[in-house]
Image (cartoon, rainbow, N blue to C red):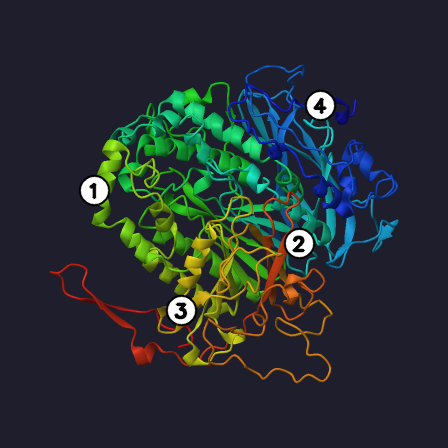
């Protein structure tokens, strides 16, 4: 019998699910999304499709039914968080899907695109009675960058439906216990001379909704093209947020509309892909959180009973959130590439005082969160067991296993790991696992590396020096290998969880850590005075962990500056433009480092011009306008060193729609939900335009060679920044990514109205030029200033002298 004949929909409410949301938006799309989303691929949600084999033998890709113009009958995917062994009238034969499919991207090499699909099934144990099979096929060839070809009988000599590019892939069990089984499917797609559309389907499984697509589609760029990139962060709500007032995850509807217009090849998650903070409010850590004495809270044990309850919380919260529309639809159609941050564990993890971070509870939940981070976000098998105070050697000595956690449980042995990962030099201080950093190609001319800035984090460091060495050694090797083949990377995208070019709030740090706060902290511990001001963990001022998280915090300043100078050296060595992605702050902004204006270096030749695309949050609520305006007022021109300045760009020429979100003088920070789109202006395009903006109209004088000479960061620095905002060519679907100079078009799409369930946005654009660096062409300030700084670390010590790293042009 066909799989869809067994589909059923569970009741909307289930009293046995202690973590189920009372908010109906979590499981229901807006009607407007049903009308607009995926208009071009409305047939993908057909409940009449059985499996991929039958689909491929049909006459053509399009459905036989009349075109709906995007008005298909989309319905919610309802997921129940409980799993108590009740049958609900269904035989638990290992074929019921409770979450997924989730699609990931890994790497490209030797003309092959590699990725994976994850499926979470109900039930399991040491052995599995059912092993699913995924069918994969190239079903259609995309026409240019703007869309798909018409569904004719053949495309470039290849039958669009009866493709020979197909395979059946047997699932690999990553983890299984009596609650759930995690199946992973490794995908390998041949990269063609044109953009291709691929389909995948898992046969003989049952989904919890009759409207769940049985066949999903994704896109692979042409072999000589780069990927179209979507970037997001902060994909969830903080504890206490009125989620109904924010229309749920409405912006994912806009993501899918954008994807329908011009398909994304990769979806980069910059951290906080899920918010697990509720574990301390309505979860198993509530009793621990309610302990008022910080010392008693620090000494609280984390036995097997509490570990099991926390493990179950993380599992159910992942299943719930990753099945929430329209995020769930995106998960199955846009390949993900993720790095975690604190809310993937719990708010502020890693940034509290060391004595508290080493307590049993934090070590325990760190292990639980890491387990499901590997499974859901990376499709990798987790460690065999995680930390408990009953068997602390599972953390203290690494390989030890807790047999209590392996009862009726299967864990795949991780023999090898995908070559896209750069594994950290040593286990983290609070999570006994190595950091998982990533290097991969994003198509022909864009390289990507993501730094895991959470696993090794403490209040005083972000990553180990040895891990930075491993990462930069790999980056240099990959860039060198590409250059030696005659196909060098022109852009290098770095993913960091936290913005790195951002206004300073050092004065606020000083206030919060001042001795003047001590009496108030004492009153808080003894009498609860000022309860909302202090966090429930180590008793510090609540905002201090957020400030300590920032690269601009005084505790991370040296590490931050060294990272930027190292990036500048790489940019000069390989003439590659570096763009940094950052989130976390629940604001949209665009920061940049650039050469001191007195050096008179055009941006197109400036290796110090490094941008920071700040896009946050796609779901969580923004801070009040007053905070955004305060940050804007702190947007000074800072001096990283004698040769490098930094500041935010005036990107927001107006508030979105007719809203009034910021004061008139604030053009640099936008307190509204958002996500970013980045597309290369491919040299293979036919548009006759140059480095980042528009062609002069007839009769208009061309711009002088460097009209931006001597400008500081409070002005536009190059042609691609000129006119940044809603009228820039990068903000329009019709012109975004359509030039041919090798630059990057960047568009931040900002929510107009939080009450709009369709999640409509207004776009703000600019262009990031490629780099043409010539060593030794321009001077440096390092010699005139000698870059000598004298400081005394203690009154009794002799002043030491530090010299900046030499300029790469000398």
Q: Residues within 10 Å of mark 2 (few under 14, many from 20)?
A: few
Query: Which residue in the protein does label 4 denote?
Result: 8
Horizontally, residue 573 falls left or right of residue 733, namely left
Q: Are marks 2 and 3 in contact (CB under 8 Å)?
A: no
Cα distance between the residues tagged 2 and 1: 64 Å
Circle 3 residues within 10 Å: few <14, some 14–19, many ≥20: some
Q: CA distance from mark 1 to mark 4?
A: 59 Å
Percent x, y for residue 313? 48, 28
Q: Secondary structure at mark 4?
A: loop
Q: In front: 353, or 437?
A: 353
Q: Which mark is residue 519?
A: 1
The residue lying toward the viewer, choosing from 64 and 32, is 32
Looking at the image, is mark 3 or mark 1 earlier in the sequence? 1
| Residue situated in front as seen by the camera: 471 or 541 | 541
Q: Quadrant of the C terminus?
A: bottom left
Q: Residues within 10 Å of mark 4 (few under 14, many from 20)?
A: some
What residue lies at 32% left-to-right and 59% top-to-bottom? 558
Snapshot quadrant of residue 639:
bottom left
For marks 4 and 3, give the one nearer the viewer.
3
Residue denoted by label 3: 637
Looking at the rendered structure, the secondary structure element under dot 3 is: loop
Disc with the residue nearer the chain's start (2 vs 1): 2
């Amino acid at each position: 019998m066909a799989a869809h004949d067994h589909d059923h929909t569970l009741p909307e409410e289930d009293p046995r699910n202690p973590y189920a949301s009372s908010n109906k938006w979590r499981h229901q799309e807006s009607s407007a999304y049903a009308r607009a989303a995926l208009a071009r691929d409305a047939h993908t949600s057909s409940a009449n499709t059985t499996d991929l084999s039958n689909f491929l033998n049909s006459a053509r890709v399009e459905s036989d039914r009349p075109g709906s113009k995007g008005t298909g009958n989309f319905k919610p995917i309802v997921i129940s968080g409980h799993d108590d062994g009740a049958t609900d009238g269904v035989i638990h034969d290992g074929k019921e899907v409770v979450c997924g499919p989730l699609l990931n991207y890994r790497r490209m090499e030797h003309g092959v695109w590699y990725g994976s699909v994850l499926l979470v099934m109900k039930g399991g144990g040491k052995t599995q009675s059912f092993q699913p099979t995924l069918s994969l096929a190239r079903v259609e060839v995309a026409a240019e960058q703007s869309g798909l070809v018409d569904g004719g009988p053949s495309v470039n000599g290849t039958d669009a439906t009866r493709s020979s590019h197909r395979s059946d892939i047997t699932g690999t069990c990553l983890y299984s216990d009596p609650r759930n089984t995690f199946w992973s499917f490794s995908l390998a797609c041949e990269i063609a001379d044109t953009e291709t559309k691929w389909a995948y389907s898992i046969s003989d499984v049952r989904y919890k909704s009759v409207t769940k697509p049985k066949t999903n589609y994704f896109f692979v760029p042409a072999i000589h093209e780069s990927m179209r990139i979507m970037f997001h962060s902060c994909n969830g709500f903080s504890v206490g947020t009125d989620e109904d007032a924010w229309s749920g995850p409405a912006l994912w509807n806009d993501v899918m509309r954008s994807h329908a217009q011009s398909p994304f090849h990769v979806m980069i998650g910059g951290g906080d892909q899920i918010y697990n903070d509720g574990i301390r409010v309505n979860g198993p850590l509530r009793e621990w959180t309610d302990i008022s004495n910080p010392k008693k809270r620090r000494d609280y044990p984390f036995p097997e009973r509490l570990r099991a309850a926390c493990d179950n919380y993380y599992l159910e919260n992942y299943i719930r959130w990753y099945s929430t529309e329209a995020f769930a639809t995106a998960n199955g159609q846009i390949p993900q590439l993720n790095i975690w941050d604190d809310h993937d564990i719990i708010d502020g993890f890693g940034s509290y005082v060391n004595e508290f971070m080493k307590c049993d509870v934090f070590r325990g939940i760190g292990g639980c969160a890491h387990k499901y981070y590997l499974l859901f976000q990376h499709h990798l098998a987790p460690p065999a067991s995680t930390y408990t105070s009953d068997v602390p050697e599972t953390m203290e000595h690494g390989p030890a296993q807790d047999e209590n956690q392996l009862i009726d449980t299967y864990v795949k042995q991780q023999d090898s790991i995908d070559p896209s990962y750069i594994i950290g030099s040593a286990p983290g201080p609070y999570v006994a696992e190595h950091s998982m950093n990533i290097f991969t190609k994003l198509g022909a001319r864009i390289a990507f590396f993501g730094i895991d800035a959470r696993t090794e984090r403490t209040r005083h460091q972000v990553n180990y020096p040895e891990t930075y060495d491993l990462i930069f050694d790999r980056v240099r090797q990959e860039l060198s290998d590409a250059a030696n083949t005659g196909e060098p990377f022109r852009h290098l995208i770095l993913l960091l969880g936290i913005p790195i070019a951002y206004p300073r709030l050092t004065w606020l740090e000083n206030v919060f850590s001042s001795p003047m706060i001590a009496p108030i902290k004492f009153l808080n511990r003894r009498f609860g005075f000022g309860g909302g001001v202090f966090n429930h963990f180590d008793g510090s001022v609540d905002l201090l962990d957020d400030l300590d998280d920032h690269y601009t915090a005084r505790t991370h300043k040296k590490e931050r500056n060294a990272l930027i100078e190292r990036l500048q050296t790489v940019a000069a060595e390989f003439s590659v433009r570096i763009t940094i992605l950052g989130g976390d702050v629940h604001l949209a902004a665009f920061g940049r480092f650039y050469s001191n204006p007195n050096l008179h270096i055009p941006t197109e030749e400036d290796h110090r011009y490094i941008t920071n695309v700040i896009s946050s949050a796609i779901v969580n609520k923004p801070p009040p306008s007053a905070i955004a305006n305060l940050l804007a007022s702190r947007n000074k021109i800072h001096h990283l060193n004698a040769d490098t300045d930094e500041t935010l760009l005036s990107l927001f020429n107006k508030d979105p729609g007719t809203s009034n979100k910021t004061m008139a003088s604030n053009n640099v920070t936008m307190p509204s939900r958002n996500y970013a789109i980045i597309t290369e202006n491919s040299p293979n395009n036919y548009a006759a335009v140059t480095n980042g903006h528009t062609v002069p109209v007839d009769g208009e004088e061309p711009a002088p060679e460097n009209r931006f000479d001597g400008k500081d960061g409070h002005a536009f620095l190059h042609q691609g920044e000129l006119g940044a905002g809603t009228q820039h060519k990068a903000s329009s679907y019709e012109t975004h990514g359509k030039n041919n100079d090798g630059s990057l078009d960047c568009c931040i799409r900002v929510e107009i109205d939080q009450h709009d369930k369709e999640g409509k946005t207004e776009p703000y654009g600019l262009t990031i030029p490629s780099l043409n660096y010539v060593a030794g062409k321009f001077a440096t300030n390092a010699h005139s200033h000698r870059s000598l700084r004298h400081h005394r670390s203690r009154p009794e010590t002799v002043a030491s002298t530090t010299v900046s790293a030499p300029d790469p042009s000398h």
